[in-house]
Structures are given as C-alpha cells and as structure tokens.
Amino acid sequence: MNKAELIDSIAKDANLTKADAKKALDAFVKATTKSLKKGERVALVGFGSFSVARRSQRTGRNPQTGKPITIKAKNVVKFKPGSDLSDSVQ
C-alpha cells in the first residue's frame, strides 16, 4: 500500500474527504517526526511504538571490491509492533 492508497482507505473508513484524510496523515507524520527528532518515543497502544536508536560506527565491505569500508554512526528509527497488530497479522 502506498501513500495515496492509505489516504483513500483512511477517507473511506473514517468517512472523511480525501483532502481531510491527507491532512490528517500529514499531521501524524509531522508530529511523529518532530517527536522522534527530540529523541522521544511515540507509542500507539495496540498498534506499536516508534523510537530512535543509535547505531554505532562499524566496518563493512564494499560489495563490488570486497575492500573494508567504515560505516558512520547514525541514529535510526525503530518500530516495535504492539500485541494487537502482531496478533492480527498471525
């Protein structure tokens, strides 16, 4: 499912216009991004939680040449699914 399909689904399920569904989705993405930038955790009970983790510097290999390269440290977003989401996928 891509963003347009998600907007269509939200509009249909919540009885909203597509424009309102797009605004709601964009607001959710913006608020989640802002919280994650601050290092805060975003938890949606039953669905899951988003958090930021630090990935330390490590050594990897260039797949074309096989030579070792250094992969820089960076922050990554992690998602842990909630129990309701996990159960519904099973």
Image (cartoon, helix red, strand yellow):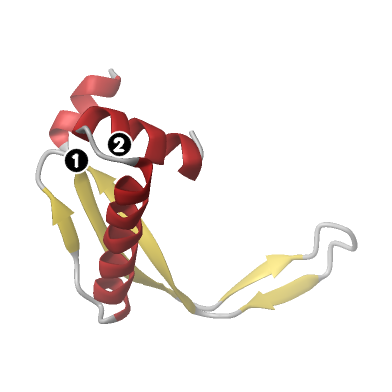
Of residues 36 and 73, the one drawn nearer to the viewer in this rendering: 36
Q: CA distance from mark 1 to mark 2?
A: 16 Å
| Residue located at (47% from left, 44% from top) | 3
Label 1 sits on a secondary structure element that is: loop
Check disc 1: other Cα within 10 Å, few if <14, some if 14-19, many if 20+: few
- Please state the horizontal and vertical placement of residue 57, each as a whole percent of the image: 53, 78
Q: Position of residue 58 (x, y in %)?
A: 57, 74
Label at residue 10: 2
For residue 66, side relative to residue 16 (left or right): right
Q: Quadrant of the C terminus?
A: top left
Give neighbour class at mark 2: few <14, some 14-19, many 20+ (Cα, 10 Å): some
Q: What kind of residue is marked 2?
A: Ile
Establish if 76 lies above or below 9: below
Q: Is residue 83 above or below residue 48?
A: above
Q: Amino acid at mark 1?
A: Phe
Q: Mark 1, mark 2: which one is toward the viewer?
A: 2
Toward the top, the furthest residue is 90
Task: Give the residue at mark 1.
Answer: 47
In the displayed structure, does residue 40 sit left or right of residue 17? Answer: left
> Would you say 62 lies left or right of 10 here?
right
Which element carries disc 2, helix, strand or loop? helix
Q: Residue at x 37, y 42 (%)?
A: 18
Marked residue nearer the N-terminal end (1 or 2): 2
